[in-house]
Image (spheres, rainbow, N blue to C red):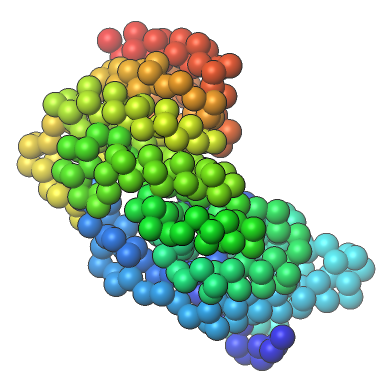
Amino acid sequence: MQQPSSRNYEFETGIYRPPSEGGTASLLLRMTRNCPWNHCTFCAMYKSEKFELRSTKDIIQDINVMHEIYLQLKKISMQQGKEGLITTEIFDQFLKKTPELYFHPGISMLFNWLAVGGKTVFLQDADSLIMKTDHMVQILKHLKTTFPTIQRVTSYGRSRTIVRKPAIDLEKIRKAGLNRLHIGLETGDAALLKKIKKGTTPEDHVKGGQKAMKAGFQISEYWMPGLGGKAMSYDHAKNTAHVLNQINPHYIRSRPFTPRPGTIFFEKASRNELDRMTPKEQLLEIKQTLETLNVTSRICFDHAGNFWTTPNGRLLLSQSYEGYQFPEEKQNLMGLLEKGITHYS
């Protein structure tokens, strides 16, 4: 392995990751830059950026640089009698020797990841599976060899990309170390998918989700309550449940619709032209979706957008990354939704 010089501790880090991969949880390894589709009208991420595939050489070099930083931290720890334990004090001593890293956007992320054991990794940006399979396998193998403490590697993935990827390639990637895929379903309604320019169909979502599940990935599907407004709420709820029932993913994560600056929805909201739903109407739509679900998934509300509260001001729904196990906890969750609906009446 070629070692970086003491003045060349550069590695690239993107901005976006799922909440469950944030905080100290995951190392952020940038495989691509931005989104290869980038037409979704509800999304403000990457809009001013061009999609690029990063080279295998550059990604492997990033891994090597991060590993060299780890070795330097471990060396200081051993010298201080900390037996390799990486603490804030050790990190501060390292930065004093490498002041050029003080403003590096990824250095705190890397330190936090190492300090908690270096167990999970998130591959950035929006659709890592679009890479050539042999390149991705090479990177994953190098990553796991370099950091043997890694237990889970995750990535965003588009249903359309998964549909186009040969099943044997998906299995190779999974065996090389990619364990979990986060897929933006948004809705299972064909008309709404077309309206938001998702670039996919309900059939794509079903086929992609089933294909990923069959390849052995752990799947998180994200759906967006309120996306269709009042006019499309019924079909959005009904058809989303229909698609999710056919996939039966490991996780179903709620990401309630919010008009984001830089999107057409935000412009309409600014002009009071948006068919927005009240908190009660949102909960009613979620109830409609969930009561139709016949899955063994975990239903999660692990995002600040799930803002509904009880009369005493506490959050109505748990924001745990593990959520509510269906069908065992379905009635409990439905009861909570009923309480919220009553509260917002």
Measured as percent of width and height from the top left, residue 46 is found at 31, 63
Side (left or right) of 164 relative to 116: left
Tell me: residue 128, above or below residue 297: below
Q: How many marks?
A: 0
Measured as percent of width and height from the top left, residue 162 is found at 42, 54
| Rendered residue at 23%/42% (across/down) | 193
Tell me: residue 234, above or below residue 250: above
For the N terminus, the quadrant is: bottom right
Q: Locate residue 72: give its quadrant.
A: bottom right
Tell me: residue 89, above or below residue 189: below
| Rendered residue at 35%/22% (across/down) | 289
| Rendered residue at 51%/68% (across/down) | 133
Camera sees residue 252: no
- Depth order, front residue of 236/294: 294
For the C terminus, the quadrant is: top left
| Rendered residue at 50%/55% (across/down) | 167
Camera sees residue 195: yes
Measured as percent of width and height from the top left, residue 232 is found at 17, 28
Side (left or right) of 200 relative to 159: left
Q: Locate residue 4: give its quadrant.
A: bottom right
Measured as percent of width and height from the top left, residue 219 is found at 51, 43
Tell me: residue 115, above or below residue 19: below
Side (left or right) of 173 relative to 343: right
